[in-house]
C-alpha cells in the first residue's frame, strides 16, 4: 500500500490532487464521504485541473474538467455534461487506516 495523505487533509466539500510514485489522483470529500479517482478526463486523457487543486465547479456540486467544462458526479464519477457525457472517471481503491489514506493495489 502507498500512503497518500492524512484523512484530515481533505476537508468536506473540497478536492485535492495527489501525485507521486506513478499516480495522479483526485481525492474529493462530499457530505463526509471520501472518493478517489484517477485525475484523467475520459474525453482527452488529460488532468482535470488547470490550477492545483481546482477540481470543483463554482457551486462545489461536481468535479469539472477545466479544459472542456465536462461535469462529473462526485459520488460515482459519471459525466453528466460535456463532450464525454455518459462516460465516467475511473474510481481508485483506497483504505483508511489510523487516520491515514492509503492507495490499495
Image (cartoon, grey):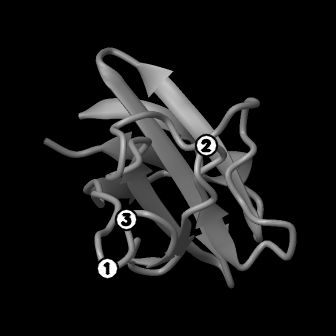
Tally of numbered tags: 3
State the residue at coordinates (34%, 27%).
23
- 67 to 99, vertically: above or below: above
* Residue 99 visible in the displayed image: no
* Residue 28 visible in the displayed image: yes
> Is the residue under label 3 in contact with that under label 1 (CB below 8 Å)?
yes
Considering depth in this image, is 41 or 105 the residue closer to the camera? Answer: 41
The location of residue 19, given as percent across then percent down, is 48, 24
- 76 to 64, vertically: above or below: below
State the residue at coordinates (39%, 42%).
40
**Residue occupying the far front of the picture:** 83
Left or right: 64, with 100 as reference point: right
**Mark 3 residue element:** loop
The location of residue 69, given as percent across then percent down, is 63, 58
Q: In 3D space, how far apart are the residues under numbered discs 2 and 3 (Cα atoms)?
A: 12 Å
Q: In 3D space, how far apart are the residues under numbered discs 1 and 3 (Cα atoms)?
A: 6 Å
- The residue tagged 2 is 67
Left or right: 105, with 41 as reference point: left
**Mark 1 residue element:** loop
- The residue tagged 3 is 84
State the residue at coordinates (53%, 68%).
34
**Residue occupying the far left of the picture:** 105
Amino acid at each position: 500500500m502507498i500512503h497518500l495523505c492524512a484523512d484530515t487533509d481533505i476537508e468536506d466539500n473540497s478536492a485535492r490532487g495527489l501525485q507521486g510514485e506513478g499516480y495522479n489522483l483526485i481525492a474529493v470529500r462530499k457530505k463526509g464521504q471520501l472518493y478517489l479517482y484517477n485525475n484523467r478526463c475520459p474525453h482527452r486523457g488529460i488532468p482535470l485541473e488547470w490550477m492545483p487543486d481546482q477540481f470543483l465547479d463554482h457551486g462545489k456540486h461536481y468535479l469539472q474538467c477545466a479544459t472542456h467544462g465536462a461535469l462529473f458526479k462526485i459520488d460515482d464519477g459519471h459525466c453528466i455534461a460535456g463532450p464525454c457525457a455518459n462516460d465516467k472517471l475511473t474510481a481508485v481503491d483506497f483504505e483508511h487506516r489510523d487516520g491515514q489514506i492509503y492507495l490499495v493495489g
